[in-house]
Amino acid sequence: MNWLIALLILTTPTDVDRWPAFLGAGAIQSSDSKLPLTWSPSENVAWQATLPGHGQSSPVVWGDRVYVTSVEGPEKDTYHTVCLDLASGSEHWRKSLNNTVPVTNSYYVSRAAPTPVVDGERVIAFFESGDCVAYSHDGEELWRRALAEDEGPFDAEFGLAASPCQSDSTLFILLEHDAPDALVAIDKASGATIWKADRKAQRSWSSPAMVEINGAVQLVISSAGSIDGYDPATGQQLWTYTDIGGNTGTTPIDCGDGRFLVGASPGRNGENAGSAADSNALIKVSQEGDQWNVEKKWIAEGAVPSWASPIMFKGFAYWINRAGVVYCFDATTGQEVYAKRIDQPSWATPIASGDRIYFFGQQGRVTVLAAGPEFKVLAENESWNDDSLPAEPMLAEEKSEERRRAAAMFSKPTLYGVALGGDALLLRVGNCLICIRD
């Protein structure tokens, strides 16, 4: 299965719409669904739901239900999982658990950043504290884990942020921080650990992904100076690739034929600037006998993203950089087709649908471009204004000047993540979810 399907509108008929994980991995959309092209705070907003606290996670969808997570309290005291009705935005249920590793609630660290996963039996929420909980679709708690007790303590100045990915039976969680790290496989039915792969200490916020390579699905991690492939059944590391750098914030997305795109950028203080420039690339993994071969097919010159992962669609690859410049490359040759600025940079990964590419601006302006070699703006949509979002209390003032500057930026409403639900776009802002539908 090509997991790039997660970013495309599929032609597989189904009566259950699914956007079951971060970046829609494993998504299925009804064949007749069509996303809206234009909207505003007063036009084509089907509903807007206020959420408890604040969250940076994306929503996930299963059938007629939407699931989203958040955190609230001065010490990030309480984590929430909320189930909403996709058609109306009404709340079906809300479940909460106490944070087992409370820390100061700050603009400078992750706040309910990992995106949950959902399947036909359950929704599983993982939080940066290491707390992990599974609920039935009716809100019954099925199991709970405090991973910091088994795999911690976590030493993460800016918090954990990697979202889990899943197979039919297993949840995969990447724990990366300033102490020895781990990749953990958990049985989705029971919550028990199946295997654990130790990794070196390194700072990264990129998420693992399932990629089909040589006819079998592998667990691929692009993180802090390496790309690694694992057997999802056993946790055995199959291969590693280290001609890479600055790859700490984006997720590899399956492009078919053992290929995936990697995004990389310099760190907060300019570290890895040289290696990051050569690390935005198309990677191909293949096998000859017992030998794994990993190579850069081409480099996306000049493309340096922030948190938005690059995507491939209909023969073209797209990056958006920190200044809001969209780079389009020929997916076969890597030749630059265009580099054009749109109004805002994006934290959320673009979504391709039909003949359009949706770029989700950090401050809520969504630019819709025509797919293909011509830079053509089809629409520019404001998703909120100063009066349309619910009020959100300010957090305590940061102690250092660096953190106060960051807080001034991070305290503004941010479009963190998106999901598709049939013919609807679901936009996640910190304390609310906005459903856009024609």
Image (cartoon, rainbow, N blue to C red):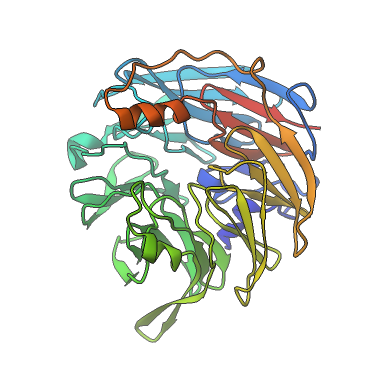
Q: The N terminus appears in which quarter of the rendering?
A: bottom right
Residue located at (51% from left, 25% from top):
412
Q: Which residue lies furthest to the bottom in this view?
A: 289
Number of marks drawn: 0
* Nearer-the-camera pick, 39 or 174: 39
User: Is 327 drawn above or below residue 119 in the view shown?
Assistant: below
* Nearer-the-camera pick, 348 or 173: 348
Give percent across and percent down for residue 317: 62, 63
Residue 87 seen anywhere in this rendered image of the structure: yes
Give percent across and percent down for residue 340: 68, 55
In this rendering, position of residue 33 left or right of residue 173: right
* Nearer-the-camera pick, 331 or 96: 331
Give percent across and percent down for residue 205: 37, 46
In this rendering, position of residue 294 left or right of residue 370: left
Residue 89 seen anywhere in this rendered image of the structure: no
Residue located at (71% from left, 43% from top):
367
Q: Which residue lies furthest to the front in this view?
A: 401
In this rendering, position of residue 332 left or right of residue 20: right
Give percent across and percent down for residue 419: 61, 39
Q: Quadrant of residue 106?
A: top left
Q: The C terminus appears in which quarter of the rendering?
A: top right
Residue located at (57% from left, 47% from top):
24
Q: Quadrant of residue 15?
A: top right
